[in-house]
Image (cartoon, grey):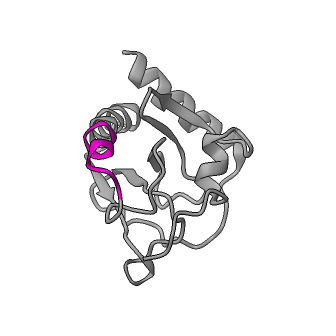
Amino acid sequence: MADYDPGNIFAKILRGEIPSHRVYEDDAVIAFMDVMPQGKGHTLVVPKAQSRNLLDADTATLGPLFIGVQKLAQAVKKAFGADGVTILQFNEPASGQTVYHLHVHVIPRFEGVPLKPHSGQMEKPEVLAENAGKIRAALAG
């Protein structure tokens, strides 16, 4: 397994070097909008601790990460009136991992609406900002 690269895009987001539409942050994780969403409200939950993926993560990272995932799953379901939530996590290239910092996808789901393909097409910033606001409002209660 390759070493962790502190130059990956999520590490840069964590350091504030690249802007993101953040919706949540605590001592262990941040959550922000996926700029190439597969569905409305597609959010990423990222631990602050360095690890390429689940396979090399310190076990102390996993509990707080999945507490954050649960919190965000509840919020996106509420924010978008979703019928369900898909949680995805990829490990290594053969699985589809493209960013080598552990992260979990949280995607609101709606009956009869398939996920969009991960096309590489970026969403409009104003749409991401609007969706982020809805999630922050749901988190606030």
Q: Residue at horizontal 37%, vertical 78%?
A: 95
Residue 138 image position (x, y, % from top left): 40, 24
Residue furthest to the top: 141
Q: Residue at horizontal 59%, vertical 60%?
A: 36
What is the span of residues highlighted in magenta in the rendered image? 57-65
User: In the rendered view, would you say 103 is above or below 132?
Assistant: below
Q: Residue at horizontal 40%, vertical 62%?
A: 53
Residue 120 image position (x, y, % from top left): 63, 70
What is the number of callouts on the image? Answer: 0
Q: Nearer the viewer, residue 108 or 106?
A: 106
Give the side of residue 2 with respect to residue 72, left or right: right
Q: Residue at horizontal 28%, vertical 42%?
A: 60
Residue 31 image position (x, y, % from top left): 48, 39
* Most common SS among magenta residues: helix
Q: Is residue 101 magenta?
A: no
User: In the rendered view, would you say 86 is above or below 141?
Assistant: below
Residue 123 sits in quarter? bottom right
Residue 65 image position (x, y, % from top left): 33, 42
Quadrant of image for the C terminus = top left
Q: Nearer the viewer, residue 85 or 14?
A: 14
